[in-house]
Structure formats: C-alpha cells, structure tokens
Amino acid sequence: MSAADLVVRRYSHNDLPKIRQTLIDVHADAYADAMDDEFNQRFPWFVDHWGGNPDFDCVIAYDGDEAVAFAYGAPSTPYREWWREHLDPAPEKDRTFSYSELAVRTKWRKTGTAELVTRSLLDERDEDLVVLLVDTEHPRVQELYESWGFRKVGERQPFPDSPVYAVMLAELPLK
Ligand SMILES: CC(C)(COP(=O)(O)OP(=O)(O)OC[C@H]1O[C@@H](n2cnc3c(N)ncnc32)[C@H](O)[C@@H]1OP(=O)(O)O)[C@@H](O)C(=O)NCCC(=O)NCCS
C-alpha cells in the first residue's frame, strides 16, 4: 500500500454535489474513534460552508474507485485572516490560503498519503501563506505539520464547543 499508487483529482465549488458524500464518508472513517463528539458530527455543515465558497479548492486521492483521503480549503478574506491577531507586524506578503481539513482513511495511514494530498492541494496555490488549525490535544498531528514547514503562532477556539486549536502558518510554496 503506497501513496504512489493513488490518483489525485482536483475539485471546485461546482463539484460539491458530486463529492459531498465522499468527503463525509472519508471523514467518518478517519475520525471513527471520535465520532461520538458532537463537534465532529457537525462535519456536513462544515463541508457545505467551505464548499459553498466560490473559491473552494479540494483534492481527493483515489485507490481505484475508492476515495482514501482528501484535503481542502479556500482563500482567506484579506485582512481578516485567523493568524493576524497573533503576528504584529504582519508579514509583508500576506495573501493567505486557509487549509481547512485533511483526512486519511485509517487503513491508509502512515503511507505518505497525508503529505500527498496536502502538497497536491497547496502546490497549485499562488497565495503567499497558508494557515490551518490543529487541536492542541493532538501534538503528533502538529508535529506532522511542522515537518512540512508550518509553525505555531498562537491558539484559538472558534466555536464554544470546538477544541482549542493551535494556529499554524507556513510560507508557500511549502519546502
Ligand atoms: C492527521 C492524518 C491526516 C495524518 O495521517 P498520517 O500522515 O498517515 O499520519 P498518522 O495517521 O500516523 O498520524 C500522525 C500522528 O498523529 C496522531 N493522530 C492522527 N490523527 C489524530 C487525531 N485525530 N487525534 C489524535 N492524534 C492523532 C497519530 O496517532 C500519529 O501519532 P504516532 O506517530 O504517535 O502514531 C490522519 O491521521 C487523519 O486523518 N487523522 C484524523 C483526522 C485529523 O486529525 N485530521 C487533521 C485535522 S488538523
């Protein structure tokens, strides 16, 4: 089982009806041990929220017909990025892509698939920066992002029932 055998396809806002259930299914598998959490159960709302953005950008990796991983996000609204309150002064180049979600089916873990979909998504972006949120109680996931060049710039809890997240920022293109 290797990420080299996967085919990565790219999708946009107009594709949402076609890929919506695929994203929900891969997410349910990836978060199988945490789906009793009501916040995780709200994932379809987040898919519709992000997918409803006209600039939604998504990649899905397939093993034959089976979707095994996805990564998606959308450009941040200029001057209203999550990271802005944590960095003063702001970097000179500040156009930012918000990397919203990454999920890999459990049986495809530790195969390089997370990096494959992350780089496939971000290599095509022309923004200066990429920002993401990672649960502060998942330090190993934070380390994974650090290995791709992200650094923690602060913490944030966007919803009362959401985890406390580390705000992580990297320059594009990723190293
Ligand atoms: C995060 C993810 C894409 C990384 O996939 P991967 O590169 O194949 O790497 P792994 O699955 O081995 O994860 C890396 C480490 O993070 C840990 N980890 C992954 N997801 C985690 C989660 N949701 N909660 C807590 N720890 C998690 C793993 O246990 C592993 O730790 P280890 O090296 O000590 O075993 C994949 O684990 C996943 O889909 N997780 C569930 C969804 C998720 O957390 N997405 C990230 C949102 S910011």
Image (tube, rainbow, N blue to C red):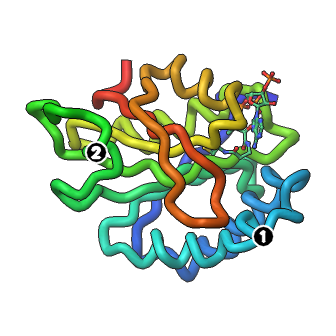
**Residue 38's mark?**
1
Q: Residue furthest bottom?
A: 17
Residue 60 image position (x, y, % from top left) = 59, 53
Q: Quarter-wise, where is residue 24 in the image?
A: bottom right
What is the distance, in whole Å, between disc 1 and disc 2 at their CAs?
A: 28 Å
Q: Which x, y percent locates residue 51?
A: 46, 72
The amino acid marked with disc number 1 is Glu
Query: Left of 34 or right of it: where is 99?
Result: left
State ligand 1's quadrant: top right
The secondary structure type at the circle numbered 2 is helix
Visible in this render: residue 9?
Answer: no
- Looking at this view, is 170 or 154 the one in front? 154
The amino acid on which the numbered mark 2 sits, given as a three-letter code, is Glu
Reading the image, the residue beneath label 2 is: 85
Is the CB atom of the residue marked by disc 1 within 8 angstroms of ligand 1's nearest atom? no
Residue drawn at x 87%, y 40% is 107
Crowding around mark 1 (Cα neighbors within 10 Å: few <14, some 14 to 19, many 20+) is: few
Q: Residue at x 57, y 33 (%)?
A: 116
Q: Quadrant of the N terminus?
A: top right
